[in-house]
Each structure stands twice: as structure tokens, then as C-alpha cells.
Image (cartoon, coloured by chain):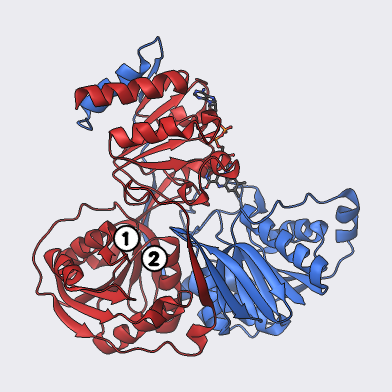
Chain colours: A blue, B red
Amino acid sequence: MNIVVCVKQVPDTATERKLRSDDKTLDRDAVDGVVNELDEYAVEEALRLKEAHGGEVTVLTMGPAKATETIRKALAMGADKAVHLSDDALHGSDALSTSYAMAQALKKIGFDLVILGSESTDARTGVLAAMLAERLGTPQLTLARKVEVNGSAIAIERITDYGFDKVEATLPAVVSVVEKINEPRYPSFKGIMAAKKKPVETLGIADASVDGSAVGLAAAYSEVAEFAAAPPRAAGTVVKDEGDGGVKAADFLASKKFI
Amino acid sequence: MSEILVLVEHVDGEVKKVTLELLTLARTLGEASAVWAGPGYSEAAKAKLAEYGADKVYVADSDEIVNYVVAPKAELLAKLVGDKSPAAVLVAATTEGKEVAGRLAVKTDSGVITDAVGLGEGFVADQSIFGGGVNVRSRVTKGTPIVAVRPNSTAPVAAAGAGAEEKVEVAPSDAARAAKIVERVKEEKGARPELTEAAIVVSGGRGVGSAENFAIIEKLADSIGAAVGASRAATDAKWYPHQFQVGQTGKTVSPQLYIAAGISGAIQHRAGMQTSKTIIVINKDPEAPIFEIADFGVVGDLFQVVPQLTEEIEKRK
Ligand SMILES: Cc1cc2nc3c(=O)[nH]c(=O)nc-3n(C[C@H](O)[C@H](O)[C@H](O)COP(=O)(O)OP(=O)(O)OC[C@H]3O[C@@H](n4cnc5c(N)ncnc54)[C@H](O)[C@@H]3O)c2cc1C
């Protein structure tokens, strides 16, 4: 089975993230890039499926040159090779143009299964997998907490508001996974060493047949009109429980007319 | 004024509160048209939509629409966008609503904004990003603006609309039938308000200690008509079902009041509740980061404080 895992480099959620004042895009230089946490579950699921069914796991990342660190991490976990879609023209792409560029790259790479994390911790739109399924004309098997492949049949459990749906489809398909699905492995020392020798192919937009006028900030379908740091929450009142903490909390609720 | 499509969220034939909020918003920006997708449609549902200002109600109530993952709903909306040329399309910013919006954006070559917490003139949307650290106003610049709006972004206000019904015949294409839902598994759903829609949410975390102990969280919730939420530590430990997880990979909630007991306030948890209007924290560790966003905090043992608070609320009713 030919599995492609889409992995994104994002700013570490633990650091302060900012928008750039000039073009109002995420300031990626100001922060440490890490693998989007949720993508680690996607990589893990891909590796488990490969271990069970054979095949190959390819990592696909779209992002600036420094995203190679993210690729190395996925390779160190055990992926076989990587494709880095990287081109200055892609800077500032929104979800629509990102999905377009990724879909073009996926068509070039070829796949039986595409796996993504359910969302990225920076943009948090949660739409990429659905957009890819739409663009590629493949089944959308998103928000999976369980994935089973049997020959060309694939079944998932999709989390819903009320519990989960059992969903069935035929490969090729696009899957996104939630963090309940597995426990991502840590790269071993051997894995880290081996990753250094694994092939990483860099694709520019022309290599992936991506139309340059359809990507990047200029092609975005939406714009940030303005932004500002959120006003800090007014410092609250903190009391130490002296046997009357519940009463004091109730007083506060009453003062705010909740009770 | 031109028409604005609102995709109706409904469960067991009941219109959900978020839809009434979306209709209220749509009315301020144009004429609200509700779009009902899937079975369960009734005169009562239509009356409810009209009560909150739907001038038109488009109805596509075949089972087919909900038997496949997301794609048929996006097809339905794309057809309506083509036929009616609305000024905008609003959906609820649930995980599924956002996916519908995403596919619709691709189909109609239109821009999409997700997780709006407000929407104003020119369809300029307010968003709160980076775990609540930055406020952004953005707008769609191409195609028909598609906006996924978070529940609790506005208060629903009734204002009668004509509620003219129009049946829409759509059969999902083969491509939209590619991911078939073969079974829906309902995991316990109590009488409490739904998590993302609730005006008050009481959440418990690792500090609660066990599934049995969640009863004290539930009692507090029931005393003030709240929904119950949980941190990932609590859902991972199977103390509370996963669909009640609040946070980055759980539900995003934006209630009037959020009470967090035994939750430390990890960034991933905060990402799902930081836009709550008022936050109360009960935690025995005064250094817990959740206190940074508390309007009122009690440093103490939740097993003392929570039952006492519940008792006080009952007493003052
Ligand atoms: C990819 C990813 C996604 C994630 N998504 C989410 C998410 O959606 N939601 C989420 O919540 N987390 C999420 N997390 C996990 C998050 O990082 C934290 O681990 C989690 O929120 C911790 O839960 P907690 O606050 O209940 O537990 P802890 O951090 O262990 O905190 C427990 C708190 O309870 C207090 N306490 C203990 N006993 C008592 C007592 N008797 N009385 C009062 N206080 C007490 C302690 O002082 C402590 O502050 C995610 C993590 C990752 C990596």
C-alpha cells in the first residue's frame, strides 16, 4: 500500500505566536517550528498500516526550507521517504490554495491512502482533509479514531457529537485522524541516524504542476483586514479556600447574576 | 437585500440553538434562508425557523443526504449557491460544519472563514486565534463568502420571517456517495444541554480522580443547568466520554460561564475554552496556569469546594 502522510511544521504552541505586521501572515521566523502534534498520530497510523499490510510511507510537507526539520522527524519515526513542496510562490497560501497545491503534489506522487492530522495547531481550520477529498475525488474518511484496511476496503470510526459513525469506503481515500487513535512512537537513535540517509525530494510549484497564480498571498480567497493582540483578561480575584471557598464562589456567581 | 443561506443543524427533528443564532446574524446582514438537509423535517421545525426570521426554508429531507460523510451536504449547498446566488452562506463551526464549508468553498471557488465569533457589515468576521492571544478581523475576497460561525457568538432573537418552503430535489452524485455511513453509534447523552451550545459549562480534569467522582462535577452542572466537559486527561483515562472533551482536539466552547475544576490549564485545553465570557477556577495548586485566565479562582480541594458550591447554589435558588 502506498501511503502518503501530510505533515506540517507549525510554531510551537508553547511559545507566543504573532502575525507579521507587513503581510499579516504568521510570523514563522520568530518562533521554533515543530511538527504539528496531530500529524504525529497520522505518521504513527501510517507506519502501523504499513507494518500490517506492507507498502511504503511517503511524507509530504508543504512549507519553507526550514520545514526539513519536520520531515526528518517523520523519517526518523520510520517513514521511507519524503517530498517537500517548497516554493517562495507558496508563501501566504490560504486553506484553498494549500489544498490545491497539496492535491497537485499528491497526484504527482500517487497514493492509495492519504493520512493527515485532524487539524493544525496554528491555523486550526480543520478543513484541509475535506478539501483534499473534494479535489481528489476520493472518499472523505475524516476524524477517524480507528482505521482498518482490508484489501481495497477501508473502514473507519469517525467521531461525532453523539459518539461515532462507522464509515466504509474503497481505496484510494483521504483519512484524517484524531489523537485518540494511537500513541505516536518516539524516534529511536537508529531511526534518527537512518533518517539522514532517506531520500527527500524537493518539488517547486512547476514540478508539481501548480499554477503559480493560484497560490500564495496574492491568490488568497480571504484577507485579514486587521488584527490586534487580544486585550489581556482583567486580572481575576483568587481566594484561598478557608472552608468557605464554595460559598465565596457562589457569592461571585450571584454578583454576576448567574444565580 | 439579498439572501443569506443558513445550513440548519438539527437533531431528532429539533432545530439546534446555533441555527437560531445564525438566523439572527443573517437577518442583520440580509434575508435569512434556512437550508434543511436530511430527514426529520416537520411543520414544527419550519415554524421554529420562521420564528427566528427565516424568510425561506429550502428542504432536502431525503435520507441519502446524511448517509454519506459530508459531501452530499456540500453538493446541496453548492446547488443552492448556483441557483440562488446568495450573498453568503453561514454554517455552524462544528467539526462537520467546517468540513461542509471547506468542500463547498472548493466547489464554488469561494473563500471560507472558519471559527468566526462575530460577523458584521460586509461579512467581516471576527476570529480569535492562537489560543485566544490574537483577535483578527477578516473577510472573504473571492466568490460567495462562506463563514463557519461558532455557537454562542450571538444571542438568538426571535423576529418572524415568512418561512416560505421550497423543496429541493437532489440526489448525491456517485463521488458524494464514496464514504458510506453504515452505522451511527450513540454514546450516552443525558438530559443536559449540549456542550458547544450550553450557556454554562462545568468541566473536570485529572484532579477529579475517577469516573465515579465525576458525579460531583455533574451535580454542580445540574444545579445551574450546565453542560459537563472534561479535559483530555479525564477523557483519556475514560472517566468521561471523549465527546465531552474540551480543547484543541475536543470541542471548542464559548459559554457565558465556564467552571474548571481540577484542570491545570494546558494551552491545548485553553484553546477550547478561552473565549468563555466568565471563567471560574477551582484548583489546589495556586501556580496552575488556569488561574491566569480566571475571573474568580478558589485555591482549594475540589472535593470540598465543588460540593459546597453546589449546595450554596441549591440553597439560593
Ligand atoms: C495533540 C494534543 C492535543 C491535546 N488536546 C487536548 C484537548 O483537546 N483538551 C485538553 O484538555 N487537553 C488536550 N491536550 C492535553 C493537554 O496538554 C494536557 O495534558 C491536559 O489538558 C491536562 O489535563 P488536566 O488539566 O485535567 O490534567 P493536569 O494537567 O494533570 O492537571 C490536573 C490539575 O488538577 C489539580 N488538582 C488535582 N487534584 C485536585 C484536587 N483534589 N482539587 C483541586 N485541584 C486538584 C492539579 O493541581 C492540576 O492543576 C492535548 C495534548 C496534545 C499533545
Residue at the spot of label 1: B125
* Residue B113, label in figure: 2
- Alpha-carbon neighbours of circle 2 within 10 Å: few (<14), some, or many (≥20)? many
Measured from the top left, where is residue A138 in percent x and y?
Answer: 58, 82
As measured in the structure, the alpha-carbon distance from the residue carrying label 2 to the one carrying label 1 is 8 Å
Element type at mark 1: strand
Side of B304 relative to B61 (left or right): right
Q: Quadrant of residue B78?
A: bottom left
Check chain identity for marks 2 and 1: say if they share one: yes
Give the amino acid type for the residue marked by disc 2 in the picture: Ile
Count of number-bearing discs: 2
Q: What residue appears at the point 43 percent right and 58 percent down from the top-left corner?
A: A161
Side of B270 relative to B118 (left or right): right
Side of A173 relative to B267 (left or right): right
Considering the image in quadrants, where does the C terminus of chain B appear?
top left
Q: Nearer the viewer, residue A35 or A49?
A: A49
Q: Chain of mark 1?
A: B
Q: What residue appears at the point 34 percent right and 82 percent down from the top-left corner?
A: B62
Considering the image in quadrants, where does the N terminus of chain B appear?
bottom left
Establish if A124 lies above or below B36.
above
Q: What residue appears at the point 24 percent right and 53 percent down from the top-left corner?
A: B154
Q: Chain of mark 2?
A: B
Q: Quadrant of residue A110?
A: bottom right
Q: Nearer the viewer, residue B206 or A115?
A: B206
Measured from the top left, where is residue A18 in percent x and y?
Answer: 50, 48
**Looking at the image, do the residues carrying marks 2 and 1 touch, with CB atoms under 8 Å apart?**
yes
Measured from the top left, where is residue A106 in percent x and y?
Answer: 66, 79
The quarter of the rendering in which ligand 1 is drawn is top right
Give the amino acid type for the residue marked by disc 1 in the picture: Ala
